[in-house]
Image (cartoon, grey):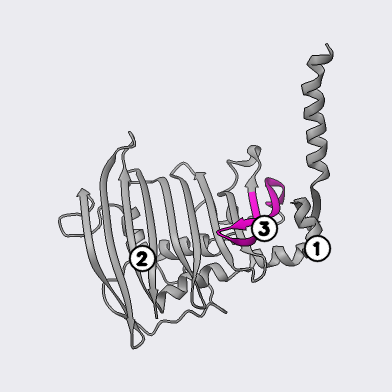
Amino acid sequence: MFKKSIPVFICILYSITIQAQQTVDTIGQKIITLSEVVANSKLNIPAFIDRVKNDTTFYKAFKNLDIIGYTSLNDIRMIDKHNSTEASLYSKTKQTVQNGCRKMQTLQQQTTGDFYNSDSSYNYYTAQMYASLFFTKDSVCGENNIVAGREFSTEGKSGIEKHKEQLKMLFFDPGKKIPGIPFISNKTEIFGDDMADKYNMDIDMDEYNKTSCYIFTITVKPEYKDDVVITEMKTWFDDKTFEVVARNYKLSYDAGVYDFDVQMEVEMTHYKNYLVPELMRYTGNWKVLFKSRERGVFTATLFDFTD
C-alpha cells in the first residue's frame, strides 16, 4: 500500500514545485503565466504585451527584402489526400537591386505534375499566393522599408489582391480584426478582452540561435478550439532589442463553406543592420466553395544578402 502511494506523492510534489516556479499576472481580462526566470527578471508585463500587440519588427523584416538583394531556394509541393506529391516546383532565384529598382532572375527551375496550366499560369491557388508574395516578374521601383504609419486595408481591392492583403493582416499583424472574411473577422482578435478567456498566455526565457529571448506563447484552451482562428502562436523576442527572432503559427477554422488548417514557421537573421527572414516553412490544408481542396507544403530559404 505504501509503495503504491509513492508515485502519487511524487506527482503531487512535482505539481506543487511547478506551480511554485510560476507567477500569474493579470492585464485586463488576460491572465499571463510567467516562468520563474521571467518573474525574477522584473519584466514590465503590461509594456511587454503592448510591444507584442504593436510589434512592427516582424513586418519590417519582410519589407527589408524590398530594398536589398538576396538568393532564395523555393520548394513548393502540392500533396494529394494520400500524402503523395501530385505537383511541385523547385527553383533558385536571385533578386538584385540597382538604382532604386529590384528585379528577380530565375537561376534554376524544375517542376513536376500539373503545377502550371497550359498558358503557364499557376494551377494551384497556394502556388499563386506564394508567387505573388515572393516572386517578381518585372522590375519594381520606388519601394522602401518604412512601416511606421502603414495600415493594411482591403478597401478598393478584390480577387487575389484582396486575399493577399488579408493574408498580410493575419501574418504580419496577428491579433487584429480582419475585415472581409465571412464568419471569422472578429475571431482573430487574440488580445481582445472578449477572447481572453479562450487562451492560455505564457512568457518564458531561453536562447534561440544563440540569442537570449523572451518567449511569448498563446495557446487556445481545448474547449474553445472551434471558436478561434489562431490556435497557437509562439514568438521569440530578442530580450535586448525586442526584435522578433522567430515565430510559429497554427491557424485552423471550419466555417462550413470553407475550412483551413495551416502551420507556419519563420526564422530571422541579420544582414548588416537589416533584420530579414532567412527561413519560412508552410504546411496548409484548405478548401473553399467551388474550388478543389488544396494541400500544400513549401519552404523558402533566403541567403547571400547584398546591398
Sequence-earlier tag: 1 or 3: 1
Q: Which residue is mark 3?
A: 191
Residue 215: x and y, percent? 65, 56
Residue at the spot 60% in from the left edge and 68% down from the top edge: 243
| Lateral position of residue 226 relative to residue 137, left or right | right
Q: Which of the two residues, 301 or 139, is positioned nearer the viewer here? A: 301
Camera-side mark, 2 or 3: 2
Q: Which residue is mark 2?
A: 134
Q: What type is the residue that disc 2 sits on?
A: Phe
Q: Residue 42: which disc?
A: 1
Q: What type is the residue that disc 3 sits on?
A: Phe
Q: Cα distance, mark 1 to mark 2?
A: 40 Å
Cβ atoms at labels 1 and 2 below 8 Å apart: no
| Lateral position of residue 171 relative to residue 187, left or right | left
Camera-side mark, 1 or 2: 1
> Which residue appears farthest toward the left when viewing the image?
118
> Which residue appears farthest toward the top when viewing the image?
1
Give the magenta range: 195-218
> Which residue appears farthest toward the front when viewing the image?
210
